[in-house]
Image: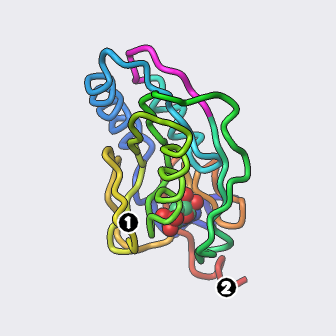
């Protein structure tokens, strides 16, 4: 059973749902009068994007991009565009949806890329923020939860591509990493 690998539930499904409602309201207020392009970063943002989108009450467009940054539990440092956007974002207000901001390298690169594609503004909404690990000046304008420096899984976040389907954010048992 998947649950047997989980040491601790850090953020419950109920808390995530509630927080997505609040973030959706805030974003809808802030982007009133604009039609933002909301860009989900695959694959980690999928459950968060789905939950958040339901709570955005203004006109918006949704797009997806994929960048690679992590292998196992350690950052590889280099960020590669694996799936680029297939529509123009020239002069658009862009909101990037990310699962977690850790070192900030992924978002630094993604923001740079989106501005180079002609975006008018680029802001970030992240489900989780680990500020203690930051090595860039990047910060998300909207944050679901600030968490300590722990490797988390669930609600989109993986360990070696597994555990994304857990409906909460949790911490894995140590023996899973050691296998
Ligand atoms: P950054 O470029 O900010 O260092 O890393 C961002 C990416 O690293 C996230 O999109 C996520 O895929 C991965 N990442 C960072 N911290 C964690 C974590 O605690 N758990 C998991 N599963 N992935 C993480």
The tag on residue 178 is 2
- Report the front residue among 21 and 104: 104
Q: Is residue 50 shown left or right of residue 93?
A: right
The span shown in magenta is 55-63
Residue 166 locus on image (x, y percent): 59, 50
Q: Looking at the image, is 61 positioned above or below residue 85?
A: above
Label 2 vs label 1: CA separation? 23 Å
Instruction: Return the x and y of residue 118 as percentages of the image width and height.
Output: 51, 37
Mark 2 or mark 1, earlier in chain: 1
What residue appears at the point 48 percent right and 44 percent down from the top-left corner? Answer: 115
State the residue position of label 1. Answer: 130
Membership of 135 in magenta stretch: no
Residue 152 shows up from this direction: no
Point 52% across, 44% down: residue = 114
Would the CB of label 1 be found within 8 Å of ligand 1? Answer: yes
Q: Residue furthest bottom?
A: 178
Instruction: Point out the image quarter for the C terminus.
Output: bottom right
Mark 2: few, some, or many residues within 10 Å (few <14, many ≥20)? few
| Viewer-nearest residue: 116 or 96 | 116
């Amino acid at each position: 059973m998947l649950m047997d690998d989980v040491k601790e539930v850090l953020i419950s499904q109920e808390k995530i749902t509630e927080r997505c409602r609040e973030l959706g309201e805030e974003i809808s207020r802030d982007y009133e009068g604009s039609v933002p392009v909301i860009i989900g970063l695959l694959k980690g943002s999928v459950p968060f994007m789905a939950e958040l989108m339901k709570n955005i009450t203004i006109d918006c467009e949704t797009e997806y991009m994929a960048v690679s940054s992590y292998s196992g539990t350690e950052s590889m440092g280099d960020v590669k565009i694996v799936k680029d956007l297939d529509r123009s974002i020239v002069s658009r207000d862009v909101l990037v949806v990310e699962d977690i901001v850790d070192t900030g390298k992924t978002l630094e690169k993604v923001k740079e890329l989106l501005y180079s594609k002609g975006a008018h503004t680029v802001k970030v909404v992240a489900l989780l923020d680990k500020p203690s690990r930051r090595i860039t000046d990047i910060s998300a304008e909207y944050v679901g939860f600030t968490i300590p420096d722990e490797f988390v899984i669930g609600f989109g976040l993986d360990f070696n591509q597994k555990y994304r389907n857990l409906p909460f954010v949790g911490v894995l048992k140590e023996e899973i990493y050691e296998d």
